[in-house]
């Protein structure tokens, strides 16, 4: 059996994101963070600054969310839409995704090579998922 880049590059996860006392379900691509994306992020950060880079990064990893406009419609997750949000919101969302990715990687590491005790603790970890 062969491994396909398309297959290993897509794994969606849903987290509950909290901001200013409100919650939203956010689905992101867990494996969207690649060396290519990292290089691209550094370029965007240098050229556009931190606020625009947050929107650019999120537009590449977000799959869906239930962040709604005044008519109850979901906002798109493209960069043109994301740049309209306050940077504090974008930073908090990016941080929530980053923490979830790190937790997932640590959990996999513990389950694959760590002790059963540590693996059990990793599974029992509470978070925003």
Image (cartoon, rainbow, N blue to C red):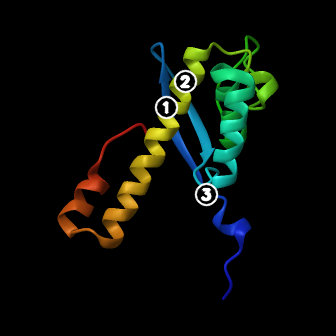
The reply to whether discs 1 and 2 touch (Cβ–Cβ < 8 Å) is yes
Neighbour tally class for label 2: few under 14, some 14-19, many 20 plus, Cα within 10 Å: some
Seen in the picture, residue 129 relative to 54 is either above or below; the reply is below
Quarter of the image with the C terminus in it: top left
Residue highlighted by disc 1: 95
User: Mark 3 or 1, which is nearer the eye?
Assistant: 1
Q: Residue at x 56, y 34 (%)?
A: 25
Quarter of the image with the N terminus in it: bottom right
Secondary element under disc 1, as helix, strand or loop, is helix
Seen in the picture, residue 13 relative to 15 is either above or below; the reply is below
Neighbour tally class for label 1: few under 14, some 14-19, many 20 plus, Cα within 10 Å: few
Q: Residue at x 55, y 15 (%)?
A: 88
Secondary element under disc 2, as helix, strand or loop, is helix
Q: Residue at x 29, y 47 (%)?
A: 125
Residue 15 in view, yes or no: yes
The location of residue 51, given as percent across then percent down, is 65, 20
Task: Give the image quarter of residue 58.
Answer: top right
Give the number of marks. 3
23 relative position to 64: left or right: left
102 relative position to 32: left or right: left
Query: Is tag 3's residue or tag 2's residue first in the polypeptide sequence?
Result: 3
**Separation of residues labelled 3 and 2 (CA atoms):** 22 Å
Residue highlighted by disc 2: 91
**Separation of residues labelled 3 and 1 (CA atoms):** 19 Å
Front in this rendered view, residue 84 or 71? 84
Q: Residue extending furthest front?
A: 46
Query: Is tag 3's residue or tag 1's residue first in the polypeptide sequence?
Result: 3
Residue highlighted by disc 3: 11
**Separation of residues labelled 1 and 2 (CA atoms):** 6 Å
Task: Give the image quarter of residue 4.
Answer: bottom right
């Amino acid at each position: 059996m062969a491994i396909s880049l398309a297959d290993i590059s897509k794994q969606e996860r849903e987290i509950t994101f909290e901001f200013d006392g409100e919650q939203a379900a956010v689905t992101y691509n867990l494996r969207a963070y690649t060396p290519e994306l990292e290089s691209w992020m550094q370029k965007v950060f240098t050229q556009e600054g931190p606020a625009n880079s947050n929107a650019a990064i999120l537009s590449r990893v977000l799959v869906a969310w239930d962040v709604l406009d005044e008519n109850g419609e979901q906002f798109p997750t493209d960069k043109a839409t994301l740049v309209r949000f306050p940077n504090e919101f974008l930073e908090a969302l990016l941080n929530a995704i980053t923490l979830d990715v790190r937790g997932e990687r640590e959990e996999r590491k513990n389950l694959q090579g760590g002790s059963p005790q540590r693996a059990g603790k990793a599974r029992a970890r509470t978070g925003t998922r």
